[in-house]
Amino acid sequence: GDVPPGQAGSAQFTATIDTSSPGASAELNVTVADGTHGPFEWFWVQHDVDVTPPGAPQILAPTAYAAPGRNTVLGAASDPSGVTLVELEVTPLPAGAPQVISCADATPDDGQWACEWDAGDTDQRFQLRARATDRWGNRSDWGPPVTVMVDATAPTIALDADVDLRLQTDFFRPGTLDLRGEVRDNNQARQADLCEQ
């Protein structure tokens, strides 16, 4: 409509965008005119239309073992419009109902995501997989599954009997003390720590 002299005005345009073909774009052309000068200013704006979902997200960690309790699941997902939401599906194995955890991504353009997951406090295997949604609501397929084992049982360590006897004496020969023993764990023990007092 008309804008009176010395005044400001605004116009709102509503249009339907054809999303039937990937790579579509929306273009708007505006001409400003008045009765004295006729058309005297032209504006043009063009935006690509994102109709494709993000690529299926990947889970980067954990990939084999998870700690009991809270874990941070880390992954990668990207989209030209940014990934604003990741859904993490957690399924107990060998059989169990899947749980879906929704995680908003505060940094949608960095190609990374994180989800908090409570793995419980018992030894249990889980299958994890994720899917991503961009800022326009386009949702990806589920990404490749990752199977993890929650290791809630602590390892045990025992010294050999002869080493244990030597440690009960008050004196040792100078040099290296050779300690031997056995570490047992139901999954995988990573290291043994020895403390000298």
Image (spheres, rainbow, N blue to C red):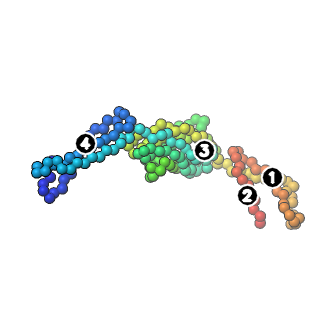
**What label sits on residue 170 in the rendered view?**
none
**What label sits on residue 63 in the rendered view?**
3
Which quadrant holds the C terminus?
bottom right
- Amino acid type of the residue that numbered disc 4 sits on in the rendered structure: Thr
Residue ranking furthest to the left: 36
Label 4 secondary element: loop
Mark 4 vs mark 1, CA separation in Å: 76 Å
Q: Nearer the viewer, mark 3 or mark 4?
A: 4
Left or right: where does residue 167 sit relative to residue 190? right
Q: Quadrant of residue 196?
A: bottom right
Please name whichever residue, 17 or 27, is drawn nearer the observer in this view of the structure. Answer: 27
Mark 3 vs mark 4, CA separation in Å: 48 Å
- Amino acid type of the residue that numbered disc 2 sits on in the rendered structure: Asp
**What label sits on residue 14 in the rendered view?**
4
Label 1 secondary element: strand
Please name whichever residue, 81 or 141, is drawn nearer the observer in this view of the structure. Answer: 81
Query: For mark 2, what is the residue?
Result: 193
Query: For mark 1, what is the residue?
Result: 181
Q: Are marks 2 and 1 in contact (CB under 8 Å)?
A: no
Residue ranking furthest to the top: 20
Q: Nearer the viewer, mark 3 or mark 2?
A: 3
Left or right: where does residue 29 sit relative to residue 100? left
Left or right: where does residue 79 sit relative to residue 196? left
Residue at the (38%, 41%) spot, across then down:
50
Image coordinates for residue 93, horizontal then vertical, percent:
59, 37
Establish if 130 lies above or below 176. Answer: above
